[in-house]
Image (cartoon, rainbow, N blue to C red):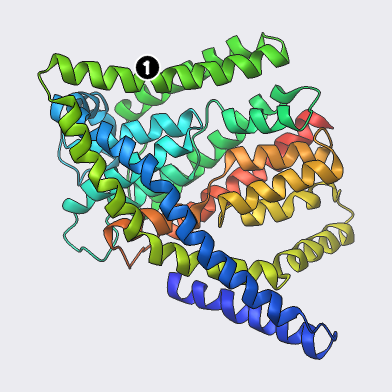
Amino acid sequence: MLNILWLLFFVIAFILALYQWLFLGDNQSFPELVKAIFDMAKLSVEISIGLIGVLAFWLGLLKVAEKSGLVNLLAKALAPLFRKLMPQVPEGHPALGSISMNMAANMLGLDNAATPMGIRAMEQLQQLNPLKDTASNAQILFLVLNTSAVTVIPITILVYRTQMGATDPAAVFLPLLLATSASTFVGLLAVALVQKLSLFNRVIGAYFLFFASVIGLLVWGLMRLPAEEMTGLSSAIGNFLLMFAIVGILLHGWRKGVAVYEDFVEGAKEGFKVAITIIPYLVAMLTAIGALRASGALDAFSSFVSKIVTLFGGDTAFVEAIPTALMRPFSGSGARAMMLETMETHGVDSFAGTLVSIIQGSTETTFYVLTVYFGAVGIKRIRHALACGLLADLAGIIAAIGLCYWFFT
């Protein structure tokens, strides 16, 4: 699947560039296409190098957490839930602790913290994988849950809206939370159907009730605050919890007699290795995305969608957000740039400017996460991971559009 899709990106880009050159007289179509490919190849390396420090820091902390037994405690707390969702993973396995920490970082909107934890979880799941080049059921479920963007406190989105001068930066908080919940639910349901997992049991129901209550109380508390105070408090809470986790891991390790500095350094050494390992995978995917973008394929698709919606008498207000929605599964930086461009062009408080904020916060860079996580452990056969991940993204996008109309029109 990924082989065919990757090849199609280049073929489509070539055909469109050829059409622009021969029939539209655009002599710059191929120079721009080639430049985009080279730029993306350079960016791939820059991203990987930029990840070294973050990976080293968090993998070092995870090593301390492992040595101190903290990961095992987290694994035991989530064991009943993941025993139902991931029956292939033994009870108390350290992968469950890494997964729980990754999910916590994602819920706080802390992408930089979530990535190294996710890679470590994927490596630990790979140890249980009998077919090393083929994604296991547990790896697929984890990746889809990761890409469905479980975001409770969208710190990054709130900061961008504040910087762009939004009248009420936190206005998107509640619709974004509902949209990301829809994305997560659809992603989990899709994997459960394919893998024949039963979600209707008391254990999963109890965890669902607990998390729903926590989210409900958080929303109730934050929505009672003025917009500016809510934005600042959301950011403060997220970063406090992150720093609390860092200090907590180190103190717990020291209390358990772990050589926190030496073990941190030992774990941090793995950061460089992982960052270098993912370079070929990033180069392959980002160059294909760059070619597709430079060829005008994404803009053409948006124009096509607009014409179809107009033909059926629908409201085309959401079409301006389509480029962000299309780019989001492929590239976080590309979608972020498109989001900011939409806010700048149409206004941060416009319907399009509001919608791109919700889409950005309720979906995930599925292709990027798939490339990095599976690439880090050498997975080549991804099975149903991509289809389920994209289905979760689609659910998030549709929910974002519907909720934006509901809340802001």
Residue 288 versus residue 279 in the image, above or below: below
- Image quadrant holding the C terminus, namely top right
- Image quadrant holding the N terminus, namely bottom left
Residue drawn at x 30%, y 50% as measured from the top left: 272
Q: Which of the 4 quarters of the picture holds residue 32?
A: bottom right
Asked whether 326 or 164 is in front, the reply is 164
Q: Can the viewer see residue 168 in this picture?
A: yes
Residue 55 versus residue 74 in the image, above or below: below
Residue drawn at x 51%, y 78% as measured from the top left: 7
Q: Can the viewer see residue 385 in this picture?
A: no
Q: Specify whether 163 is left or right of 237.
A: right
Q: What's under tag 1, amino acid-wise?
A: Phe
Label total for image: 1
Q: Specify whether 83 is left or right of 140.
A: left
Residue 302 position within the rendered picture, expressed as x and y whole percent measured from the top left:
77, 61
Q: Which of the 4 quarters of the picture holds residue 300?
A: bottom right
Residue 76 position within the rendered picture, expressed as x and y whole percent measured from the top left:
20, 26
Residue 289 versus residue 137 in the image, above or below: below
* Numbered disc 1: secondary structure: helix
Residue 202 position within the rendered picture, expressed as x and y whole percent measured from the top left:
31, 26
Q: Residues within 10 Å of mark 1 (few under 14, many from 20)?
A: few
Residue 353 position within the rendered picture, expressed as x and y whole percent measured from the top left:
78, 39
- Which residue is the site of mark 1? 244
Residue drawn at x 33%, y 23% as measured from the top left: 246
